[in-house]
Image (cartoon, rainbow, N blue to C red):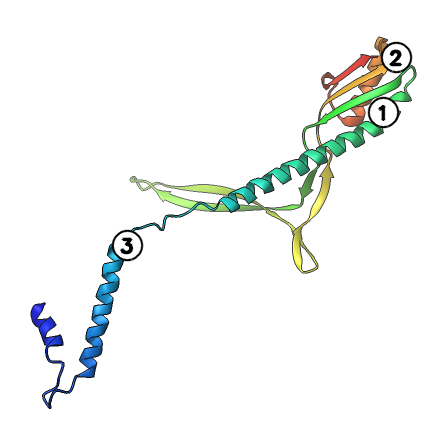
Amino acid sequence: MNKWWNKLFNPLSSKEGRKINKTKYIIGLGLIGVLLILTSSMFKPNNDKPVPNNAAVESQSQSNAVQASETTDSISQLESEYEKQLKPLLENIEGVSDVDIMINLSATQEKVYDKNLIIGKQTTKETDKNGGEREIEDYSKEEQLVLVRQGDREVPLLTKTEKPQVSGVFVTAKGVDQMTVRGWVVEAISRVLDVPSHRVSVLPK
């Protein structure tokens, strides 16, 4: 290493005099600069630790909160619409008046999209040690959404929108203290909202 270093830096002048060999001089300066950079980087403290992106986390949390709030508002609106539609119907029942209703929905409306069912079949032949052969058939099923073009983009094909499931109904009204009238009210609610009778509570005022 020392011989190579002396060979590079000692003969900075050519044999023709004391003129400096520019090529070797530039190479020498370049090597010195590289050594300085490497040395400084070795003793530089490693402070480049990844910093958590608090802004991104906060933004995601706010987005989730907004979605949850929108879902809650949508369910509340549907419940209010159901209550407004059902109230006059129940008050039309003979002997029933002054009806108050509270309806609980388990979810919002469910959208059903058209899908293509793709069935695949794969046959594998196996041979045992005794020379016997057998075939193994594997079936696979895969569903793919049917897409239709709307303008410059493709969207899933909506086939129907199902009503949300009712989890419970509570009714207070005048006249339902009679068993017959109460039975009429429970049956009407069960048929209109497609909810089992044991999820309907009807009490007199």
Q: Residues within 10 Å of mark 3 (few under 14, many from 20)?
A: few
Alpha carbon distance from label 1 to label 3:
76 Å
For the question of whether residue 22 can be seen, the reply is yes
Kindly state the secondary structure of the residue where label 3 is placed: loop
Circles 1, 3 touching at the beta carbon (< 8 Å): no
* Residue 175 tag number: 2
Which residue carries the number 1 mark?
Answer: 87
Kindly state the secondary structure of the residue where label 2 is placed: loop
* Residue 44 tag number: 3
Q: How many numbered marks are there?
A: 3
Q: Nearer the viewer, mark 1 or mark 3?
A: 3
Alpha carbon distance from label 1 to label 2:
14 Å
Kindly state the secondary structure of the residue where label 1 is placed: helix
Tell me the quadrant of the picture where the N terminus can be found: bottom left
Residue 152 vs residue 123, the one in the foreground: 152
Alpha carbon distance from label 3 to label 2:
86 Å
The outermost residue toward the front is 18
Residue 204 vs residue 31, the one in the foreground: 31
**Sequence order check, earlier mark of 1 and 3:** 3
